[in-house]
Amino acid sequence: MPKMKMEDYLIEKKLPFFWCAGCGDGIVLSSILKSFANLGYDRKNTVVVTGIGCWGKADDYINTHTFHGTHGRALAFATGIKLANPKLNVIVLMGDGDGATIGGNHLIHAARRNVDITAILVNNFNYGMTGGQYSGTTPEESYTITSRYGHIEPSFDLCNLVEAAGAPYVARGSVYHVVQLQKFIEEGLQKKGFSFIEVISTCPTHFGRLNGMKKAPDIMRWIKDNSVSIAAAEKLSPEELEKKFVLGKFADRDIPDYSTKYQAIIDKCTAKAAKGGVTIER
Amino acid sequence: MNVISINRNRCKRCGICIEFCPVKLFDTEIDGTPIPQRIEKCTGCKLCELRCPDIAIKVEVIKDERQ
């Protein structure tokens, strides 16, 4: 097979992207497409499932099979696609509003079920497409269009949540640390089972503007200054860790995935039926 | 010497490449477009290409055979 390039997976005639100047979505999309190329993914054998939101529009630019679902339900659709044809590579793209707030329940249950899909959640701390309302991951005391006097709710730590729910691969990267991010995406795609990658991203138009970071480089620098690795985070006190982004791999374990277990049940039943033990009604 | 090409139709002038180039080789045009100016300083790290949100930068690393 010829070596694939990133451009093979990109619909170039649709560029420039519809995202705002300095939006991190484009950085994550090019990382994903480069990972596809490095792993030599077959376009006909790959399905990208997206939800609603700015990041949900990413499927417009991807030259594989794509499925644009309803808000928050991307993981539910992806589970169905993977179970209908377990040979497909299924990748789910969702934002923080889509995947962690409206579809939060789907996220923990997909992790618990351990269906072999790769979920890439781009966290820009607000609902960007609808005008910058706060989401489940908006940091405390930050300003959004619906929390003009400072946000009073604590935010979700998505990586800990998904790890506790039982996912075999959990990692957090950021759009500033692009080389590390691409490594996580490639590992997540290769991992058998539910792999979850959270990407800390930028929203200069809404979140950045209301929090004193009007320009894209300002918000990139904010991510850079507030990022710590897992090893460095262990030495910090809980007070120091507040408002910091802990980047790294939180879980990397081998547990049998849903499709493997389901196939085992099918094999067991067909073997039994062949012996005349049970009759399968069709 | 490496070649940095910028696709002006795709570039949205966000300034990320200008700000985060490790050797600060970009200058800014009046409308915010990056211009690769001190090209001899380019180390070929490709961080501008990787961090570009609009896939507008291409860095071609050319090895000098004479050296």
Image: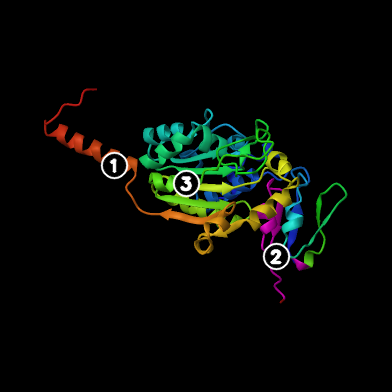
**Which chain's residue wears label 3?**
A
Disc 1 marks which amino acid?
Lys
- Disc 1 from disc 3: Cα separation: 20 Å
Closer mark to the observer between disc 1 and disc 3? 3
The residue at the point 35 percent across, 53 percent down is A254
Instruction: Please tell me which of labels 1 and 3 falls first in the chain.
Output: 3
Do the residues at discs 1 and 3 belong to one chain?
A: yes
Disc 3 marks which amino acid?
Phe
In this view of the protein, can residue A274 be seen by the observer?
Answer: yes
Q: Say whether marks 1 and 3 touch (CB < 8 Å).
A: no
Q: Secondary structure at mark 2?
A: loop
Give residue A225's position: percent from left, percent from top: 65, 58
Q: Main secondary structure of the magenta part?
A: loop
**Which chain's residue wears label 2?**
B
Name the residue nearer the viewer: A164 or B60: A164
Mark 1 nearby-residue class (10 Å; few <14, some 14–19, many ≥20): few
Instruction: State the extent of the magenta-drawn residues as a range.
Output: B41-66
In this view of the protein, can residue A66 be seen by the observer?
Answer: no
Mark 1 — residue?
A261
Mark 2 nearby-residue class (10 Å; few <14, some 14–19, many ≥20): few
**Circle on res. A196:** 3
Do the residues at discs 2 and 3 belong to one chain?
A: no
Count the marks: how many? 3
Give residue A194's position: percent from left, percent from top: 41, 45
- Disc 2 from disc 1: Cα separation: 51 Å
Mark 2 — residue?
B62
The residue at the point 57 percent across, 31 percent down is A52
**Residue A187 colored in magenta in the image:** no
Residue A62, quarter of the rendered image: top right
- Disc 2 from disc 3: Cα separation: 37 Å
Give residue A35's position: percent from left, percent from top: 54, 51
Closer mark to the observer between disc 2 and disc 1? 1
